[in-house]
């Protein structure tokens, strides 16, 4: 290709047709996201049709309508604006923005590169089309209840506590004090963190209410809103060598936007000169695609269960001082 055949970059001061096209694209994205927020439309904002289909459509429109040096670069720029619109309109705040960003950028770049290869023709373009049906199938995950991976999952964390089982049971029966998580991932991503708890006892029917950091969204003029989780003891048994208690989640306004929390189980048993405490958190994933959000939520819940275990280990240590 000669230098004269190369597409010219956008002039900084002239509103070219390509710029008007991008403006119209962003306006359409804003209108679509606003309609999705207003109507909810069967929870499509939690499906792969949103997290895979939306960036794919943006990338395709950019590639086939915008004349620029790099259609992939323009697609990434438009996706960035789309992320900002989605965070403000869908009300998911910075958590979903941070977690979903790699997926959205990756899909936009992949689709833009595939479309550019197809336009260029030749063997590379034909090979690039092989990914189209795969992308189409992945984009439909979550629509009409479809999911590639099981939605039910659990996280587990365990610690060895230098104390007798009776002291561990006493700590579990009382509301603990919560500290900042040690795990870098839990501190880097603005997940809800527990700040205080009320309630005590390990007998069936005993309840806990855990307050979390307030919800802050990116909507203009939004105010922080409180969120909490109410749990009730459903099963319990213990003796001098250990025990088991199961908490059912009765109400959850802390994590309901990302997962359906079901129950938490604490098992403690004598091990060597101390007590092994294991927490298991059961939940159901509500976001698709499963191949992306599934591993992330599983890893996060493992860290949360480990955080619970270390929290009660510290409570036992504090009670012994």
Image (spheres, grey):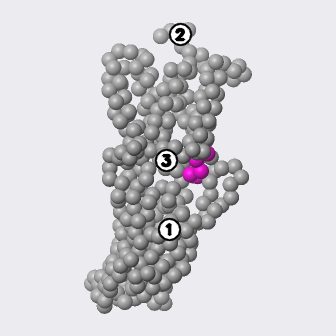
In this view, the residue in front, 206 or 216, is 206
Residue at mark 1: 251
Q: Residues within 10 Å of mark 2 (few under 14, many from 20)?
A: few
Q: In this view, does 153 lie above or below 5?
A: below
Q: Are marks 2 and 3 in contact (CB under 8 Å)?
A: no
- Residue 4, by quadrant, is top right
Q: How far apart are marks 2 and 1 (CA)?
A: 63 Å
Q: Where is residue 181 shown, x and y percent of the image?
A: 49, 67
Where does the magenta region start and end?
89-94
Quarter of image, res 212: bottom right
* Residue on which disc 3 sits: 43
As drawn, the label of residue 5 is 2
Residues at marks 2 and 1 touching, judged by CB atoms closer than 8 Å:
no
Q: Which residue is drawn at 38% across and 77% down?
A: 234
What element does badge 1 sit on?
Answer: strand
**Camera sees residue 223:** yes
Whichever of callouts 2 and 3 sits on the residue coming sooner in the sequence is: 2
Residue located 63% across and 27% down the image: 24
């Amino acid at each position: 290709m000669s230098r004269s055949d190369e597409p010219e970059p956008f002039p900084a001061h002239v509103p070219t047709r390509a710029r008007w096209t991008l403006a119209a694209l962003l306006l359409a994205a804003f209108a679509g996201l606003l309609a999705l927020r207003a109507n909810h439309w069967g929870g499509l904002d939690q499906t792969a049709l949103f997290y895979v289909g939306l960036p794919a459509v943006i990338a395709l429109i950019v590639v086939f309508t915008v004349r620029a040096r790099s259609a992939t670069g323009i697609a990434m720029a438009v996706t960035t604006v789309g992320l900002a619109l989605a965070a403000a309109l869908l009300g998911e705040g910075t958590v979903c923005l941070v977690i979903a960003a790699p997926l959205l950028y990756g899909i936009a770049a992949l689709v833009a590169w595939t479309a550019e290869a197809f336009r260029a023709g030749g063997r590379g373009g034909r090979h690039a089309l092989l990914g189209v049906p795969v992308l189409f199938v992945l984009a439909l995950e979550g629509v009409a209840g479809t999911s590639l991976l099981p939605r039910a999952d659990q996280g587990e964390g365990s610690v060895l506590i230098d104390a007798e089982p009776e002291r561990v049971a006493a700590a579990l029966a009382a509301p603990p004090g919560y500290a900042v998580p040690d795990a870098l991932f839990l501190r880097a991503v603005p997940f809800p963190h527990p700040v205080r708890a009320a309630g005590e006892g390990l007998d069936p029917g005993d309840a806990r209410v855990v307050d979390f950091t307030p919800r802050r969204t990116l909507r203009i003029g939004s105010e922080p809103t409180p969120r909490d989780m109410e749990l009730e003891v459903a099963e319990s048994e213990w003796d001098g060598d250990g025990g088991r208690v199961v908490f059912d989640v009765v109400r959850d306004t802390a994590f309901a936007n990302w997962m359906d929390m079901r129950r938490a189980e604490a098992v403690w048993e004598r091990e060597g000169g101390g007590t092994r405490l294991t927490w298991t958190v059961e939940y159901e994933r509500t976001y698709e695609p499963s191949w992306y959000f599934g591993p992330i939520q599983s890893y996060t819940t493992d860290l949360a269960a480990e955080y619970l275990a270390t929290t009660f280990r510290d409570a036992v240590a504090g009670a012994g001082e």
